[in-house]
Every structure is written in structure tokens, then in C-alpha cells.
Image (spheres, coloured by chain):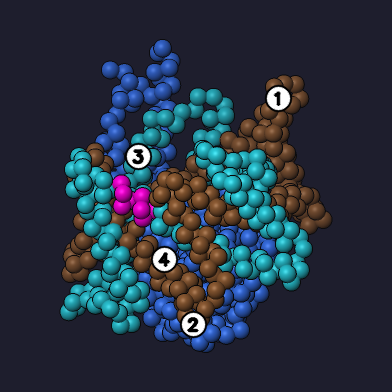
Chain colours: A brown, B blue, C cyan
Amino acid sequence: MHLSPDLWVWVGALLTLFVFSFLFGDNPFYKFAEHLYVGVSVGYMIAIYYWNFFKPDLIEPLFGRGELILIVPLILGLCYLAIFIQKFSWVVRIPMGFVLGWGSGIAIPAVLQANVIKQIQGSLITSQTLAHWNTFVWSIVVLIGVITTVIYFFFSREQKGSLKVVANIGIIYIMIGFGASFGYTVMARISLLLGRLQFLLRDWLGVIH
Amino acid sequence: MKIGEILGKIDRRIVFGFMAIVVIVPFFFPLNVTGKVAPPSQQLFDAVEEIQPDSKPLLISIDFDPQSMPELYPMLKAILRHAFSRNVRVCMMALWVTGVGLGEAALNEVAPEYGKVHGKDYVYLGWKPGFAAVVLGMGKSIPETFPTDQYGTPLESIPMMRGVKNFRDIPYAISISAGDPGALTLWIPYVQSRFGQKLGTGMTAVSAADAYPYLQSGQLTGLLGGMKGAAEYEHLVAEAGYSEASKPATQAMDSQSMAHLAIILLIVLGNIGFILTKGRK
Amino acid sequence: MKQGIPRLLCLVAGIVMIVQFFIPHPISEKIFSESLRWVRIISAFALVLGVRSITVHHGTRIIRKSSGWGYSLVALVAMVVTAVIGLFGGVDPHATALLPTSIGGFSFHLQVLYANLMVPLGATMFSILAFYMASAAYRSFRARNKEATVLLVAAFIVMIGMVPIGSAIWPKLPDIAQWLLNVPSMAAKRGILFGIALGSVATSLKIILGIERGWLGGGK
């Protein structure tokens, strides 16, 4: 056992235990840790926003190099602050309108290209997939899965007859997909716990290497 | 009391205690089971392997924060070790403001192991707000989007960034991603599709299954899924003789395996209790 | 005016961004590049709203001496101290700054606070979910019908096949898990992806055309 001589490691370990104490119910130690986390995170963000953005991208170009065009986005950004004055709170809609319109405008072609066209291309049976029996068979299985899943989701009218058979196949695919996601989610949550245990056992207590 | 009722009434603190024992014990009594390397992990390794040494940089984006650090930080370090051992230059950036420090910590830890120097062998661009506006801006001009690095040094005065104008000068980009903004929501639609950027990702296991459609379509070249993906990458890097550093993700894999078996056992027991109780009713 | 100007701005910005994608003319390229800069600047101001909201929330609790006001004090003090250290101590530990960030060998630089306060707190917050997930899986994950059974079996295969013990139990298990992810699971995810993609395109169009007005809030 080689206890860490670093004061900060002890602070980190103590805070880790404070958060773990939530497993025994809500308590003052957990609440302290939770509020400390919120405060430090916001303080950190303020500093990073200033050094990484406000100083190099707004203050220096506008006031140092005289790039006056930046007054327009500056004013639009300042419009956000109108929310603090009830009479002028509607002004906040102006930057929101610009950012929402801009975001929607760039999203439409990007999403269509990446998540529709390229994905349809990926589902097609090509000469490459015909090269080996297994890639061909699995491509057919994938194609059936994609079509039946889409049918299950898109046909909102009563599913009966052949439509019901197809939709039921879609459900099987979807359940396999959800099962795979669940399996991976279990993995993720356990990994997060293991990371903290490594910190306590290795970095703090020094009982593992 | 019947078995079904007993199984249905086990206190959650017993479940908590059981899980704690299952995950802690393997750290002291390791099984040292080595698993197979999944093909998507191998793909990512191969893509980094193809980058020319002392040439255009590998771009790594920190799209996560401390909340998913145990899964993603080990893979970040393993990728850095791989790149630095091959003298591949690294250009790092962050899209998550609360993740900026993780990129800095990883570089501070790994770069000295290989004697790498900031500005010559690697650069940390830091973070900018605007998500899509940042990556789309980089597609036009990296120096205009990041006029300075994280520490205020103008990009034009950083030797390794000379000649690096936009994504055409980035042979491979990796988004280490915990969600939105990240590989699936930002890098694929706005960078891979628009600029044809060759892209890989290391992501939390929670969203790893969602990345497979992009792997199959070729939009992603390589995927590390969660801590298991990190362990596989650590294994590949060590096997190739690139690093002898400690492998935290690999070390945790025995506990990970045991925890999975324990959860399966719990689900089976819960279902036995359910079937027995239902049968009685 | 209170709704008209924002809606017009939304319409124009949306249409210009769609057009520039399909018509890469030097003028549209120039507009696009400038708009990227503008959006980055405007987005940054959202921080002010977040800081204000936290300050008001915790400030009110302290002033009113509401139950647990001491914790609010912790949050506000932590925020101010970290911000002051970051703003005046700088982000570069090797540069000279207005505020010294170490006393003797003891450093309290922003990066040190990040690594030793934010990292342990943030990482542990989510790690406790492992216990709750195990408990919830034990209590609620039931093979009630054939669909749930398929889900359960797929989950088991991925859970065992994707960790090293899987290959020790049966060497074929990792391959089966990988096949499951590559073929049936991938097909389902792709089908769902189509739905999400078309839904998001429709929503984006509705926002640009002013059919979706939720963002305008109430009032005129």
C-alpha cells in the first residue's frame, strides 16, 4: 500500500467518496459535492470562454484590429441580454431567429446527404457484395431489416395481413438493435465505475499498480 | 417464503454490495483473459498507421468531458502513444468546453514520454463555441477558425501548422465522442459528407451500436467502442512495440467481464423469480 | 414587428444556407464564411444566460435563507473563485499572469482545479449509475413475451461477446456478437436513422418556413 502524498489526490478521493455516498441516500456530503461541481464547472467555462473566444475572436479583432463588421454579430449576441428586461424581452427572438434559421438551413442538406443518401447507398446490393456468398447473404439480411424496420415505423395505419407479417419481422430487428444497445449501455456504465475504482485503488491508496 | 418471493424481495443494497465485490476483486486477483480485437478497432489502428510520419497532422477532437472520461480518456492516450511513437504529428481541438482540460492533461502526460514538443510535433488548438460553425469553418480555413492555439500563440507562427489550411491537409480525423456534438451528429454530416474527410471515432459504449450504419457505409473508418475499444487499442499499440506504458483500460477488463456476468446472473435470477411467482398466481 | 423580424431573419438565414450548399459561387462562399464567424460569436453569448440563471437561482436561495442555502453558497463561491483564478491566472501555466497560481510547490492553476475537482466529481456522478442499472436490470428486465426475449438474448450475446471473457467461454462468441452488431442491429439502426433524418429535415423546413413557431414563445 502506497498512499498518495499529493494533497490534490486526497481532495479528489474525498470528493469521489462524497459522490459515492449517494448510494446510501441523499446526504449533506453528496449535496456539497454536487453544488461544488456546478460552481467549479461554470467558473471553468467562464474562464475558457474568455481566453478561447471573447479575447481572441471578439475583443482583439474588433478593438485591436478594427474589424467593424463584427459589431453586427456583437449586437445580435447582446440582444440575448434583453431577456433580463421584461419590456424588451422579445428582442431575444432576433438572435434566436438568425441562429435557428442558419442551423436549420445547414442541417437540411447535411442530414439528407449523410443520413439518407449515403445510408441508402450503403444498403444497396452492389457487385462488391456479390463477390462472396457471405457478404451477399448478409447484405440481403440487412436490406430486409432496413425495409421492414422502416415499414414498421412509417405505416401508422392498422397493421394487418401481409403488412403485419412484414412489420413483425421489423420488430424482431428492432428488438435485436435495442438489445445490442442495452448490452453496450451496461458496458458503458460499468466502465465509468471501474475508472473511479482505479483512481481510488491505484492513484490514492496505491494498492494496485 | 417461496423462492420466487425471496428473489423478488432482495434489497437493492444487497445488489449494490454484490456488484461492488464483483468489480473490486478482479483488480487484486486478475484473470488476465485476453480477448479478440474487434475489426472496427483494427480499422482505426490501421488508419493511424497509414499516416505519414513528420508530415500532415492527425486531427483529434475532444468531444467529451469528465463524465465519460473513464471510457474515453484511455483511448485518447493510446491513440496519442501510437501517433507519437510513429512521429505522426497531432493537432488536437475540443468541441466540449468542459473537455478542454482533458486534452491538455493527455498531451502533458503522453508527449514527454516520446520527447515531443508543442508547436513542432503537436499543437492544441483548444475550444471554440458554435459547434457546426466551428467544423464548417475549419473546412474553409483552420487558421481563420482557430487564429491562435489554446495558449494564445498565433497559428501562423507554429511550425507544424504551416501548410495546414483546411481538411484537405488532414489525412485522418478522430472524434473522441460522448454524444452531441460528436462524431455522429457533427463530424459525419458536416465534415465527412461535405468535405470527404477520412474519419474515425472513439465513442462511449452507449452510442457505439448507433455508429455501425456509418461503418458499413464507409462514412466511418474505424471505431473504438467504450473501454473495451480502448483496451483493444492499448493491446494493438503494445503488440506493435509502440508503447510499454501502463494500460488502464486493459487492467479493468477482468472487472468488466465479471460485472457483465454478474448482471446477466441478476437478470436471470430476476426472471426465475418472475416465472415462479407468475406460475403461482 | 416582435414576431415578424425574427421570423423573416430565420427565413432568410435558412434559405441562404440551403442555397449556398447547392450553388458554390464566390459570393455565396463569402456570405457562408462570414456567417460562420457570426454564429460563433452569437452562440457564445448563451453563456451569459447560463451564468445569470445559476447566479439568480442560488443568489435567491441565499438571500431568502431557503432550506439548503449553504449549498448554494458553495456553488456561488466555487464559481467565483474558479472564474477569478481562470480569468486572472490564465490558461497557460507557463505564462506570467496577473494572479499567481501557485504558492511554493502548491499549485491552484485552472488546470489543477479542473483535474482535481471537476474530473473526480464529474466522473463519479455518472459512475454510480452502474449500481442503479444493476438493480433496475434485476427488478425490471423480464422476458414477458417473444419480443422481450429476443431483446434479452441479443443483450446477453453483446454483453458476453464484447468482453474478453466471451472468447474464453466460447471462441465463436465475439464473432457472433460482432455479426449481431454488423448485420441485424445495424439494419434496425439504419431504419430508425432514416426516420430521425426525415423527421429532422421536416422540422428544419417547418422552422425556416415559420410553420414551427415554438421558439418564439408566447405573446405577439
User: Tag 2's secondary structure?
Assistant: loop
When the figure is inspected, residue C157 is found, relative to residue B221, above or below; the finding is above
**Amino acid type at image mark 2:** Pro
Helix, strand or loop: magenta stretch: helix
User: Tag 4's secondary structure?
Assistant: helix
User: Tag 1's secondary structure?
Assistant: loop
User: Tag 3's secondary structure?
Assistant: helix
Q: Which of label 2 and label 1 is nearer to you?
A: 2
**Amino acid type at image mark 1:** Arg
Q: Which of label 2 and label 3 is nearer to you?
A: 2
**Residue B151 placement (x, y as % from top left):** 41, 78
Residue C89 lies in what quarter of the image?
bottom left
Identify the residue position indicated by label 4 in the image. A49
The reply to whether residue C98 is visible in this rendering is yes
Question: Closest to the observer: B4 or A7?
Answer: A7
Dot label at residue A157: 1
Start-end of magenta stretch: C50-57
In the shown orientation, is residue A203 left or right of residue B123?
left
Chain assignment, label 3:
C
In the shown orientation, is residue C173 left or right of residue A112?
left
Mark 1 to mark 3 CA distance (whole Å): 38 Å
Tell me, yes or no, whether the highlighted magenta stretch contains residue B117: no
Chain assignment, label 4:
A
Q: Which of label 1 and label 4 is nearer to you?
A: 4
When the figure is inspected, residue A196 is found, relative to residue A171, above or below; the finding is below
Q: Residue at x 61, y 64 (%)?
A: C35
Identify the image quadrant of the C terminus of chain C.
top right
**Amino acid type at image mark 4:** Tyr
Identify the residue position indicated by label 3 in the image. C132
Q: How many marks?
A: 4
Residue B163 lies in what quarter of the image?
bottom right
**Amino acid type at image mark 3:** Tyr
